[in-house]
Image: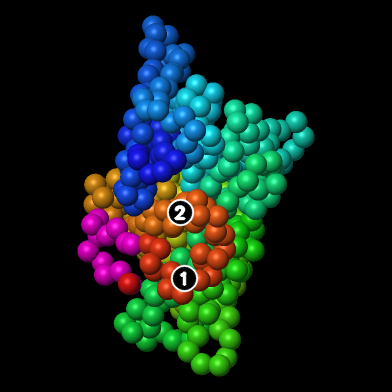
């Protein structure tokens, strides 16, 4: 990429997130060679090597990485940071990583338990990383685990814009209360209460038509995760009045969907008219047995759930490809692209401008995203 002293490097091989972001910035990715030394032992026993195939001496390198959770992926990124700084002579190295690995392990639940998000922060710092750009961390406390500059993008304004637009469609089609009286924002678990409360204020501002302040109602899903059996969730129902209303759950991460589907089930059992869910980082893991064989796909779980519509972003390109190729998954899923958000953030960081100013100055947050809707024929709000 020839753009002054800036160079863009993909964090893993053939990463669609890196390619789309580079395209948005009007640049090419620096050529990188990823090598795996295969042995007679299982694949995890092999070694990996990365080689930067362009002169980046004295330049600022941005490593673009959407986590895919494959073997040695974090090791590859650590190798890239080290290679860019020590072997290639880069002036600075920044990491653009929408979802931080192991971010859910941000607190301990019993003694002698690992705090892996802190460990990942130390790993990234130890190889010389200068700064990091992330999106919708599992909790704000993770920011304090880093001793390097961390820019934390929050999608609250974008979700607020999209939810308000979607609700206005339902107002026209179904005769719902135009002031948001028939909209309830669902809290899937206690950890998301503060974030959803702030989102309710954002949606309320966009639904306001007169002098009165609009306050969107909240409903809290009461759940308990059994830490002795990590995949087991006990649902104790939904706290709040959702009878005849649209319930919109929002979360930062979707793994297997257990919490979300239980919350949707509780909402429908309480008389909810329509249940929608929006998630920033969507993985959609299939259910597998002890031998790794798929016994239930995520598409089947979503299709059989009480979620009427699932809205996700493209921070995990593999899930986006599944939405486009799987008709059953695409029938319920819509994808918003955060590429413009990250692109604008990188440009502002390079110019020494604040990201808070970016979100405050842009009145219509729709300019920060576009909707990928090839997989579904549903109309989407613009």
**Rendering quarter of residue 51:** top left
Residue 294 visible within the image: no
Position of residue 46 relative to residue 165, above or below, is: above
Position of residue 279 relative to residue 240, above or below, is: above
Is residue 45 within the magenta segment? no
For mark 1, does the 10 Å Cα neighbourhood hold few (<14), some (14 to 19), or many (20 or more) residues? few
**Contact (Cβ within 8 Å) of mark 2 with mark 1:** no
Outermost residue to the top = 40
In the drawing, does residue 239 fall left or right of residue 345?
right
The residue indicated by pointer 1 is: 362
> Chief secondary structure of the magenta span?
loop
Quadrant holding the N terminus: top left
**Rendering quarter of residue 309:** bottom left
The residue indicated by pointer 2 is: 347
Give me the residue at 47% from left, 29% from top: 57
Residue 43 image position (x, y, % from top left): 41, 16
Quadrant holding the C terminus: bottom left
How many numbered marks have been drawn onto this rendered protein structure?
2
């Amino acid at each position: 990429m020839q753009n002054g002293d800036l160079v863009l490097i993909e964090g893993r091989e053939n990463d669609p997130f890196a390619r789309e972001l580079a395209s948005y910035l009007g640049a090419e990715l620096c050529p990188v060679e990823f090598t795996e030394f295969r042995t007679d032992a299982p694949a995890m026993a092999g070694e990996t090597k990365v080689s930067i195939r362009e002169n980046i001496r004295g330049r600022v390198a941005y490593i673009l990485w959407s986590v895919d959770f494959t073997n040695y992926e974090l090791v590859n990124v650590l190798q890239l940071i080290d290679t860019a700084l020590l072997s290639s002579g880069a002036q600075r190295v920044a990491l653009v990583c929408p979802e931080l690995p192991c971010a859910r392990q941000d607190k301990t639940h019993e003694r002698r338990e690992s705090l892996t998000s802190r460990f990942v922060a130390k790993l990234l710092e130890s190889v010389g990383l200068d700064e990091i750009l992330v999106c919708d961390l599992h909790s704000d406390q993770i920011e304090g685990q880093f001793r390097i500059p961390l820019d934390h993008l929050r999608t609250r304004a974008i979700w607020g814009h999209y939810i308000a637009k979607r609700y206005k469609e339902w107002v026209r089609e179904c005769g719902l209360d135009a002031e948001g009286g028939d909209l309830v924002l669902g809290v899937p678990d206690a950890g998301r209460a503060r974030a959803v409360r702030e989102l309710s204020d954002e949606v309320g501002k966009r639904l306001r038509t007169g002098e009165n302040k609009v306050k969107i109602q909240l409903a809290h899903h009461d759940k308990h995760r059994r830490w002795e059996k990590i995949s087991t969730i006990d649902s104790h129902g939904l706290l709040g009045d959702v009878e005849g209303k649209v319930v919109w759950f929002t979360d930062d991460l979707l793994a297997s969907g257990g919490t979300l589907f239980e919350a949707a089930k509780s909402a429908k059992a309480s008389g909810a008219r329509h249940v929608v869910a929006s998630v920033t980082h969507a993985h959609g893991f299939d259910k597998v047995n002890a031998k790794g064989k798929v016994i239930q796909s995520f598409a089947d779980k979503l299709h059989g759930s009480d979620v009427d519509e699932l809205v996700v972003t493209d921070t995990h390109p593999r899930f986006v490809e599944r939405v486009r190729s799987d008709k059953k998954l695409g029938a319920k899923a819509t994808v918003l692209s955060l590429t413009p958000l990250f692109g604008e953030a990188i440009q502002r960081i390079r110019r020494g401008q604040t990201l808070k100013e970016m979100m405050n100055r842009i009145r219509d947050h729709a300019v920060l995203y576009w909707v990928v809707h090839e997989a579904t024929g549903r109309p989407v709000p613009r």
